[in-house]
Structure formats: C-alpha cells, structure tokens
Amino acid sequence: MSDDLHQALAGVRAEIDGIDGELLRLLNARARCAQKVGEIKAEHGEAGHIYRPEREAQVLRRLQDTNPGPLPGESITFFFREVMSACLSLEQPLGIAFLGPLGTFSESAATKHFGHAARLLPQASIDDVFREVESGHAHYAVVPVENSTEGAVGRTMDLLLATPLKICGEVVLRIHQNLLTRESDLGKISKVYSHAQSLAQCHEWLNHNLPGVPRVSVASNSLAAQMAAAEAGAAAIAGEAAAEHFQLPKLAANIEDEPNNTTRFLVLGKHDAGLSGRDKTSLIMSAPNRTGALHELLLPLSAAGVSMCRLESRPAKNALWEYVFYVDIEGHREEPAIKAALELLAGKAAYLKTLGSYPVAVY
C-alpha cells in the first residue's frame, strides 16, 4: 500500500471513528429520553402502554421522508426499528408470540416489526399464538392473514371473529423461498419437505427442476429444514431464517414462482393504535339473509367517501350457508368520516365487530 493511499484511508477512517463516537453518544442520549418517557407514563398510571404503534410509524415515516441518502429508506427503517426496540427493552422487553418454531417467516415478521431486542415466544399453532396474548403470557401476537399468491389464512380469520384482541399493526414481508440441502446438486435430491403453502408457491419451479421428486408437506418450513438437515438426499423449501438457524446451505435461491410473493401479518394486542396519519381499520360484519343486503352494508362507506382495500368472505360457524365479511378500509375509526360511517353501518349490519385501527405498514 502506497503512502498516499495509506494517508487517504487513514483520514477517512479517522472521520468514521469520530462519527461512530458521536453516534454512540446520541444513541445513549436517545435511550435516556426513552427512559424519561417511561417514567412520565408511570407517574400518570400508563406504564403498561410502553409500545405506541402510531408513534413508531410517525417516526419511521418522518425519517424516510427526510432521508437524503445514500442509505435507502429500507435500511433507515431497519436501523431505527432496532434503535427503538433496544430503547423499549430498557423499560421492559416485549414478549412477542408467533407461529413457530424458530426459523419461520412468522419469526422474520415478528423481528422485522419489533426488532431483535424483543423476547420471541414461538408457538405450536396459530390458536396458541392468540391464547398466549389473551392470557397475558405475551404482550403481542404476530399472525399471518393473507398471502399474495395463496390468499387468506383461514384459521387466523376464524380466530379474529372470537378474540377480544385488537389489531394494532401490520407487517408486510417479501417472501423469498430457497431450496436448502446438504447435497451439492439437484440430481442427488430424492425428497422435498416444506409447508403446503410454500410447496404451492414453488410448484412450477419444482415441476421444471425436480420433476417426479416426492414433495412432503410438514407443519412448518422450519421443521422441513430441520428434517432435511438430518436426512441424506432430502431438501427443504424455506426462508433465510431457517437456513441460518439450521446451518443448511442454499442450493437454489428465490425459487418462488411469483416474483412479488408477499405475506401480510397482523400485530395483535389488548389495544389498537391511535391516529398516525396513515391508517387502516379492519371490520367483521354480516348481512341479513336477503337480496342486496351486502350492497346496503357497503353504502355507508361509499357515501362517506371511505375507500375499501380488502373484502373477504368466510362461512359463519353458527349457520349453514351463512357468511361473515372481513373488510379493511382506509382511515382510522376516530376520523369523523369513518366514525359516522361505522355508526350507520352498525344500524344496518346483523353483526359488526371493529377489529382495530392501526398504522399502514412502513417498509
């Protein structure tokens, strides 16, 4: 290395060291402010609400809007989520229940939303995830609700009908599927394990690259990776988290058939969120069994100028051929137009449940 190059690098590295020192000072100053917020809440009897989804969303959006680069917005969001996660943990680490085991996409969604300082609590089923928060053993739940290629997650939607929990956030996770195996080429693979949805999401890739190889559906992608790691000739379709957790090499990456394969997760707790400035409200409703009843239900939303961004139907559990409708609308239930529309809707619907208002996911 020439003297000129050494001096040039030394100067830049010294500047980096100085910036790192300033970052360290500022991060700790921010942490002390977070502690003061906790103390003020405790003085006013609100110590239980240390996590405010609307405040977090506002901070992240402001940072993205004012980010001059060169770091992309996604990196800024990741960094500051981790900062906020670490600051929250100084008051109390949040317990987050999700569909386990470790290494699933649900774990990735929970970490993406709550950061690595959260206390992750993997559960054996979606039912158990709900129960963990309902019983007070966890602060929040992260559950899958829909996939862009495979549609709604029926069990989550059915449980939303009965739970007292509220939706307080959402996570949108880009799903990259990988073929994980200890084998060195495709010709040596004799079996593929994965969750049924992941097998479906990679159907055409498997047909083209592993025709005739048996596909075995298991409870989770993480279990599939665990099984493939222990069995010669076996492979698993799973995500990055499972590859890291089981130290299983990727023989092929991004094998999903749809390039924009995405799963939406809901964050559930014992409260929803306040106004953030860009929100959604989720509802469940049923219509009287008569012609045009659903159209009548949607009229109050249309008349109030409320945009509907999702409408799903599910069979009602208490009557044959009866249905309930899951609706996502743009806006917060405390906004005047939304509030008025919901009051009108309550008078028309045979059943109406507001699942919660919450910030639109920040990427």
Image (cartoon, rainbow, N blue to C red):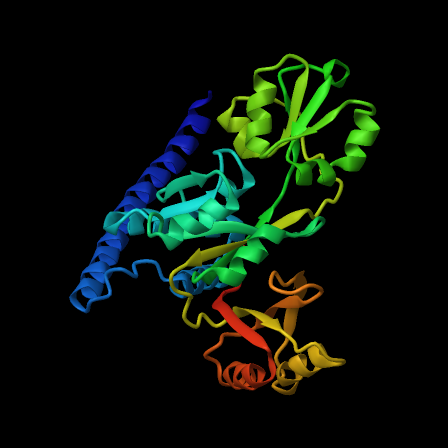
Task: Give whichever of 176, 48 is nearer the camera.
Answer: 48
Residue 81 visible? The answer is no
Task: Give whichever of 328, 214 is nearer the camera.
Answer: 214
Which residue occupies 59% across, 72% down?
285
Where does the image place residue 259, in percent across and percent down from the top left? Answer: 72, 44
* Relative height, residue 58 to residue 203 (above, below): below
* Relative height, residue 193 to residue 268 (above, below): above
Where does the image place residue 322, in percent across and percent down from the top left? Answer: 68, 67
148 relative position to 99: left or right: right
127 relative position to 150: left or right: left
Where does the image place residue 290, in percent across and percent down from the top left? Answer: 73, 79
* Relative height, residue 198 to residue 350 (above, below): above
Which residue occupies 59% across, 78% down?
350
Residue 235 visible? The answer is yes
Pick the quarter of the image with the C terminus: bottom right
Which residue occupies 18% across, 60% down?
39
51 relative position to 154: left or right: left
Task: Give whichever of 6, 227 is nearer the camera.
Answer: 227
Q: Quadrant of residue 286?
A: bottom right
Q: How many marks?
A: 0
Which residue occupies 50% across, 63% down?
65
Q: Quadrant of residue 205?
A: top right
Q: Which residue of the protein is positioned furthest toward the left in this rendering?
A: 43
Where does the image place residue 324, in percent across and percent down from the top left? Answer: 63, 67
Q: Which residue of the protein is positioned furthest toward the front in this rendering?
A: 319
* Relative height, residue 13 to residue 146 (above, below): above
